[in-house]
Image (tube, rainbow, N blue to C red):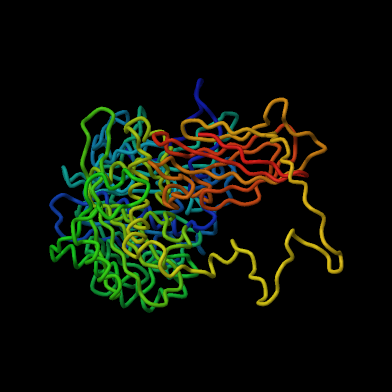
Amino acid sequence: MAADWVYPEVTPYQVQGRDLSEDNFAQEDRTSLEILMREVLQNPLDARASDNAGPVRVTLKILQPGNFDADYLASLLGGEYSKRLEASGGEPLPDLAMSSVLVIEDFGTTGLQGRWDDQNADGPEENWNAFWFREGEGAKSATGSNGRAGQGKITYYRIGAARAVFGFTVRKSDGQRLLMGRSAFRRVYPYGGSKFNRHSFWCCGSEQPLPVTDDEEITAFQDAFGLSRKSEPGLSLVIPFPAGFDPKEAVRTLISDFYYPIACGNLELSLASMDIDSSNVDTIAVREFSDETAYKRKSSFTKGFRNLVRSAIDAKNNGDKFVELKPGWDKTPTLKEDSLPEGALETLRAAMENGKRISVRCPVTVRPRKTELIQTWFDVHIEIPEDLARAEEAYIRRDLLIGSESHLAASAYLQKARALTIISDSNLSAFLADAEEPTHLKWNGSRPRLAEDYLNPQATLRAVRNAAPRLLALVSNGMVRRDMKALAKYFTRHTDEGKRHAAGGNVKPGGGTPPNPDITAPKVRKPVKIVTGTDRVRVLPNGSSALTAEGLPISCGLELAYEGLDQDPFKAYDPFDFDLADESVHQVTTSGATITGRQGNRINFDITEPEFVLEVPGFDPNIRLRARLNYTEKSNGTSVSEE
């Protein structure tokens, strides 16, 4: 039976509308090409064959007109398909004579495993069904994958004008050769008097979508698009009419996001007439990815940072033994000297002062709800070079860069440094995979899957995030060589030498002796109150003492800190406990108030209406939170405090 398009109609009780998962990949600071490249390379790394001791190899080719069979492509995306695409809100297809095709093939992988004759089969090995028939969930194993959300494949569809993908796989498990295609239109759509689903399938079968297995039809597909795969296990994807695929930009994305697995020897690529592997990636990076380019892209992978990565890889391959923190190091707000073995701190400081890399292994506990505690670990590598223009850091889980995690630059008290955090342990990797946003660019301690599967996940996540800055603070004595330019905006200008302000404040010249101030203490009035919850704090009007419209606006400063033992919590505030400037963690909501600034443990805001509320969430529910507030009105108010 020859393959053809099947367009399923909308059925009763089916939710209709547009695909919202695509919005998760519309990142303002990331292009569609960058997000596509992450998915293109992450998936083959996940699908590495168990007996493959070498690298996974990926080839990407743009077939220009004349380099593929345009008539064959026209037969795949003929008149009816184009009309349905436009009915769903898509643009008319480009002229075939002026069009191109993107071909992506991976080798050294397993191909799409699992049942291909039952689309309802679920399980950790059902990759065929996960790729073609699932959204919002994947079939990747708990401890062996870079991606888990199951949404990333939408990036294949959004890069092509036809919003269609064709896939040919050879499976390592049974050697079967399977071919199928699918579309992902933007929304359900009307056509011919009926309403149809967003998804349609190029397939065989009438009862359910089945792949093409006929050798003659598969060979015709291979020949039409010049596929390299014959009988080697893996997956080949064909995406018609790719928009905005710039090979040089793709190479730059390889350097900024996948330098680590390439340098490790886990990944090789063929792209833009270049073969890229561990032996030549540094040469290509010097040519294609200058430090200036890295700065513009907000990437840490400058030449110096790549040298740090190479050094860390060599240390691992050579079996170097790292200094190891004692268990429980992450239980205190700041990293203590006794968290290190005796004499280790002096050794680390000496190495850092000499410009050498320091490497520390950090034990941490993962707390599954249904099984016993799991003891895991991760490694942190730090160096402080001379005259570093900015902090450079990277968090790498297995082979995947979590590109939006950045915690060194959050504190102006720390020296500018390079830091590399590597998570290799499979159990910790699985935990962090559950914490990742669908784009895999950032961790989120509030993701539902974490709360479902783990106890106190925020503590484990905070330990991983803050290990590098805490180590840097301890080893470099915490506040050595402060960056005063970065701090300048928080301090008032120095008075010119020799000039003094008159006692009692701003007094005009010739005004005579100021009158004695009234030393009678005004009655304390607290028009606002602080209410703290397990993981948040709220500022509200204080009943009958609340503010009136005539007394507004007033300016307020809310200061927060975790409770400590025998110490002032506000003086002992550690920038690594939390940073109120992080809007992804502390999603402040206001009504009748306007935020004027947020930094460290302080939020400044103006109250503009008598009935107001300010709520700050995102704190560790297992540590007591202290809060105090100062405000300024027509007559200065006093501090309001609450535990």
Q: Position of residue 17 (x, y in %)?
A: 56, 33
At horizontal 39% and vertical 49% (from top left) the residue drawn is 440
* Quarter of the rendering containing residue 231: bottom left
Q: How many marks?
A: 0
* Quarter of the rendering containing residue 65: bottom left
Location of the N terminus by quadrant is top left
In the rendered structure, the answer to whether residue 259 lies left or right of residue 604 reads left
Q: Position of residue 581 (x, y in %)?
A: 53, 51
In the displayed orientation, state which residue is furthest to the top.
12
Q: Position of residue 452 (x, y in %)?
A: 36, 30
Q: Position of residue 50 (x, y in %)?
A: 15, 49
Would residue 312 be seen by someone viewing this image from the given angle? yes
Viewer-nearest residue: 477 or 514: 514
* For residue 610, above or below residue 159: above
Would residue 215 be seen by someone viewing this image from the given angle? no
Viewer-nearest residue: 138 or 444: 444
In the rendered structure, the answer to whether residue 404 lies left or right of residue 285 reads right
At horizontal 67% and vertical 44% (from top left) the residue drawn is 631
Viewer-nearest residue: 138 or 360: 360
In the rendered structure, the answer to whether residue 534 lies left or right of residue 526 reads left
